[in-house]
Amino acid sequence: MPRPGYGRLLRTPGAWTFLIPGFAARQPFAMLTIGIVLLVQHTTGSYGAAGAVAAVTGVSMALFAPQGGKLADRYGQRAVLIPGVLIHAAAVATLVALTLAGAPLWALFAAAVPTGASVPQIGPMVRSRWAALLGPSDLVPASGPDSDPGPASGTRGSSSLLPTAAAFESVTDEFTFVIGPVLATALCAGVHPAAGLIAEATLTLVGGLLFAAQRATEPRSDRHGGAGGSAEPRVSALSVPGVRVLAVALLGIGSVFGGMQVSLTAFAEEIGDPGMNGLLYGIFAAGNMLAGLVCGAVAWKIGPRRRLLVGYAALTLAASALWTAHSVPLLAGLGLLVGLCIAPALITSYTLVESLVPASARTEAFTWLTGAVALGQAAAVTAAGQLADAHGAGAGFLVPLMGTALALATLVALRSRLVPRVSGRVALRGMSHRAPVTVD
C-alpha cells in the first residue's frame, strides 16, 4: 500500500470544490475574536470590556455549535448553513453599529449572542465531507439507485487517507490563524477599527454560500438515509465518555488561543507598537501550522492516546515560560514554541474522536470539539483581559499556563476513557483508525 500523503489526499475527486469556499468561510474563528477585541478596546479603552464582549460571543458559539451540528447531521449542511451565514452577517453588522455608536455594554452583549451563535461550523462540515468521500461507512451499495461508479469510486473507502485528512484540516485551521489575525489587525490599524469585523462578515457570507452550493460532496443527512442508509440507532456524540474528556481537554487549547490574542495585543500596546500584535500572533500560528504539516506527513508508531498525553505535556511546559518574556524576540520565540506544541494535541484529539463515535453523530462530535475550543477561548479572553488591565500583559500570559495544566491533569486522570469501544460498529464508523493503517 502506498504511504498516505497530502498529494494523494488532494487528488480526491471533488475535494477542491468544497476546500476553496470552505477556507474563506472558516475565517470567523480566526478573525472574530481579535476583531471584537480591537474594535471594542478602541471605543471603550478597556481590555476587560473588550474581552467580555468577545467572551459572550465565544460562549454563545460554544453552546449553539453542537446544536447546529445535530441539525446538519439530520437535515443536511445546506439547510443549516444558508440561514446561518445570513444571520451572522446581520448580527456582525449590528454589533459594529452599536459599538461605533457608543452603546452601553449590555447592548454589545446582546448583539454578541447572535453573532457567536450563528458562526458557521465549516471546519466540522469539511471534516464530515472528507469522511463521506473517504470512509467506507458512507458508501452507497453499488446496486443502489444512487451508486456512483465514476472516478470518485476509486477514492471512496480509502480509509488509509483519513488520518491524513484530519491532519490536513487542522493545518488548514491553523493557516487561517496565521492570516486571520494578521489581516484583521492590519485592517483595523490601517483602514478603520471596524474593518476587521466587516471583512470577517463578508468572507463568511460569500464563502458560506459558495460552500453550501457544493451539493455533490455533501454527506447524506439522516432524513435521506444517514450514513449510507444505515439502520444504526442515532446517538448523541456527548454520550460517549471519550468525547466528553476530549472536549474538556480542548478547553485548554482554547485558553491558549484566547490568552495569546489578548495578551499579545496588550504587550504590543505596552511597547508602543500596536501593529506588532499581528506579527507576533502570526508567528505563534505559523508554528502551529508547521507542526500540523509535519504531523500529517509522519508515519506514527506511537498510538494516538499516548501522543495526546505527550503533546499536552509539551504544550503545558512551553506555556509555562510565556509570562516571563519581556522582549519581542523572546516572546516571538516562545510563541513559536507554543504553536509547535498545539497542532499535535489538536490533530490527535480529532483523530481520537473520529474513532469514538458513530457516523450518524459525526458532525455533532466535531462541533463539540470546536465549541470546546471556542468556550476555552472565551473564558481565556475574559480572564486575560482582566489580568492585563490590572497587572499588565505578563499576567495575561498566565491564562494559557493554567488552562493547559488543568487539561493535562484531566487527560491523565481519565485517559482510560479514550479507548474506542469495540462492540458493534460504533468504534469503527467515521474517520477512524483501523488496524491496517500504517500512520498510527
Image: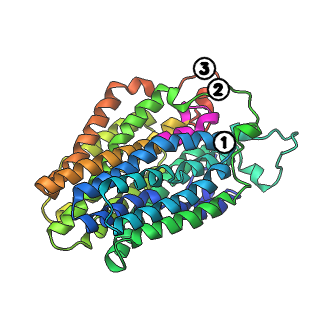
Say the numbered circle drawn on residue 135: 1
Compared across the picture, whether 368 is left or right of 432 comes to left
What residue is rendered at 19% in x and 68% in y?
269
Circle 3 residue: 423
Q: Residues within 10 Å of mark 1 (few under 14, many from 20)?
A: many
- The picture places residue 79, in percent across and down from the top left corner, at 67, 50
Q: Secondary structure at mark 1?
A: loop
Q: Residues within 10 Å of mark 3 (few under 14, many from 20)?
A: few
Compared across the picture, whether 429 is left or right of 260 comes to right
- The picture places residue 30, in percent across and down from the top left corner, at 42, 59
C-alpha separation, residue under disc 2 versus residue under disc 3: 7 Å
Say the numbered circle drawn on residue 338: none
Q: Quadrant of the N terminus?
A: top right
Looking at the image, do the residues carrying marks 3 and 1 touch, with CB atoms under 8 Å apart?
Answer: no
C-alpha separation, residue under disc 3 versus residue under disc 1: 19 Å
What residue is rendered at 82% in x and 38% in y?
141
Q: Is residue 393 magenta?
A: no
For marks 2 and 1, the one nearer the N-term is: 1
Mark 1: which amino acid? Gly
Circle 2 residue: 425
Mark 2: which amino acid? Arg
- The picture places residue 303, in percent across and down from the top left corner, at 45, 35
In the image shown, does 364 or 437 lie closer to the viewer? 364
